[in-house]
Amino acid sequence: MEIVQEIEKQKQYIEKVKKIHQNKKLKYYILTMGCQLNENDSEKLCGMIEEMGYEPTDNYQEADLVIFNTCCVRENAEDRLFGKLGELKKVKEKRGTIIAIGGCMMQEKHITDKIHESYPYTDIIFGTHTLQNFPEDLYKTLESKKKLQDVIDIDGEVYEGLPIKRMNNIKASVTIMYGCNNFCTYCIVPYVRGRERSRHPKDILEEIQELAKEGYKEVTLLGQNVNSYLRSEQWKEKGIDYHGINSFATLLRAVNEIEEIERIRFISPHPKDFTDDVIDAIANCEKVCKLIHLPLQSGSSNVLKTMNRKYTKEQYLNLVDKMKAKIPNLTLSTDIIVGFAGETEEDFEDTLDVVKKVCFEQVYMFIYSRRVGTPGDKMPNQVPEEIKHERFDRLKQLVESQIAENNQKYVGTIQKILVKGPSKNNPALLTGRTDSNKVVVFEGNKDVINKMVNLKIVSEHMWYLKGEEVKE
Ligand code: 5AD
Ligand code: SF4
């Protein structure tokens, strides 16, 4: 079926569900696990669910519909899901709540088997390629009262035009590509999200132009490997060139031209695809934040090889040097996995060495988690848990000492902040983030909320900075 017809069909199901509920006030509860791509999927789910007449609630005990949008990148998300499902049994018995589970974990057979076996009261299981069918799945479940599983293994199409409910009113995420072709040996993503599929530049630009009109100031372009945007098979043959957009670099330049948008971020690029045109685009586009997330994963060339990352320690460091030379005021953040199969003490020290040399603004640290179906899981020489934890703690110590040192550099500088609103911890203060994603709190008038202001940083505290407004 054509994509446009498919979307039309789902819109009809939205109307059908509304009819079943008539004007009853129903509530839904959604729990999103994992990355920003999943959060963006949840925004699409919420868009459809709210069109079907449901209102959000933070309390699953009073929900008529509960949705878990799952992640399977690391094991702890599984424990969390099963814990939550256990808690829901009583609620289901009492209220007849519809329970729907979707997302990456549902693409794994051993997980769906476990749900059927141990949590048979689950109503709907849907995968990553069938999210757009949610109105149809829900309608069929409500109509037939039967359990339903809607998971496919083939790569889903790129659907446009679904309703969406954004979680934030100044910052928005825009998915530019789906899936991943890299097959890093520790990672489950290519198996559950399928091959790379890029959205058409026209659809992306129209979405961002619409966001700009609605008052959004910051966009984050999302994808598993954003700098291979438009390089996937799907477009290569067609040789797409939409008003000069034919790559990630040219997309960045086009978004930079959208007047009302003041800040552009993107996650995640892959170091192996960080071509010069992207570096030049970041340097030339004043709205692109000079904080770049550049996943390292390991600082050891041996481990990088077994991880199938396709770069060495030296190539990573050279890339960082080149980027720092071309992009003034560049700061970097990264992802690091500790304790991958075969990682020796020497390998781990290479990771510490890279961290010392690059001095990242932020490091997202993960303990290696074996994922069923990935090559990493089958590798010999798995690192014992206690060694993984011990290394993790050493890395954490180093990172925290660097953050404290880095924070010092901010004191006395002027930083541009996009003001989010009152601080959660102290509502008398306002809060926002710098270009480099640091939280800053300051005393200010509420009329600067949703605007960019210049702040002079007056003090630093481990996880936030304090600023004072600079009047022009
Ligand atoms: N174990 C631990 N961390 C992982 N990541 C991906 N797969 C695993 C795994 N099996 C981390 C990587 C990636 C981030 C999103 O999650 O660092 O960049
Ligand atoms: Fe996973 Fe590697 Fe693809 Fe990132 S690039 S999603 S880590 S396989």
Image (cartoon, helix red, strand yellow):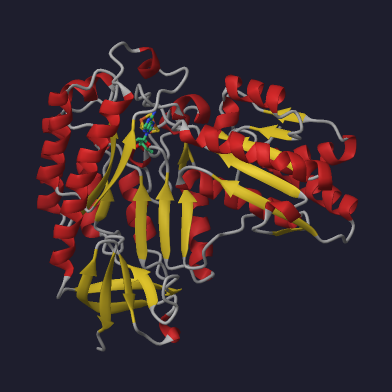
Query: How many labels were placed on the picture?
Result: 0
Q: Could you tell me which quadrant the C terminus lies in?
A: bottom left
Q: Position of residue 404 (x, y in %)?
A: 18, 59
Query: Vertically, is 220 above or below 309?
Result: below
Residue closest to the eye, 317 or 118: 118
Q: Residue at x 67, y 44 (%)?
A: 67
Q: Residue at x 62, y 41 (%)?
A: 84
Quarter assignment of residue 184: top left
Q: Is residue 73 visible?
A: yes
Q: Could you tell me which quadrant the N terminus lies in?
A: top right
Residue closest to the eye, 409 or 161: 409
Q: Position of residue 263 (x, y in %)?
A: 35, 64
Quarter assignment of residue 374: top left
Quarter assignment of residue 223: top left
Q: Residue at x 36, y 18 (%)?
A: 376
Residue closest to the eye, 125 or 116: 116
Residue closest to the eye, 77 or 354: 77
Q: Position of residue 188 (x, y in %)?
A: 45, 26
Answer left or right for 289 relative to 201. Answer: left
Ligand 2 located in image quadrant: top left
Answer left or right for 369 relative to 6. Answer: left
Q: Residue at x 52, y 57 (%)?
A: 207
Answer left or right for 456 relative to 425. Answer: left
Q: Is residue 3 visible?
A: no
Q: Position of residue 185 (x, y in %)?
A: 35, 21
Query: Vertically, is 53 above or below 470?
Result: above
Query: Vertically, is 414 above or below 120?
Result: below
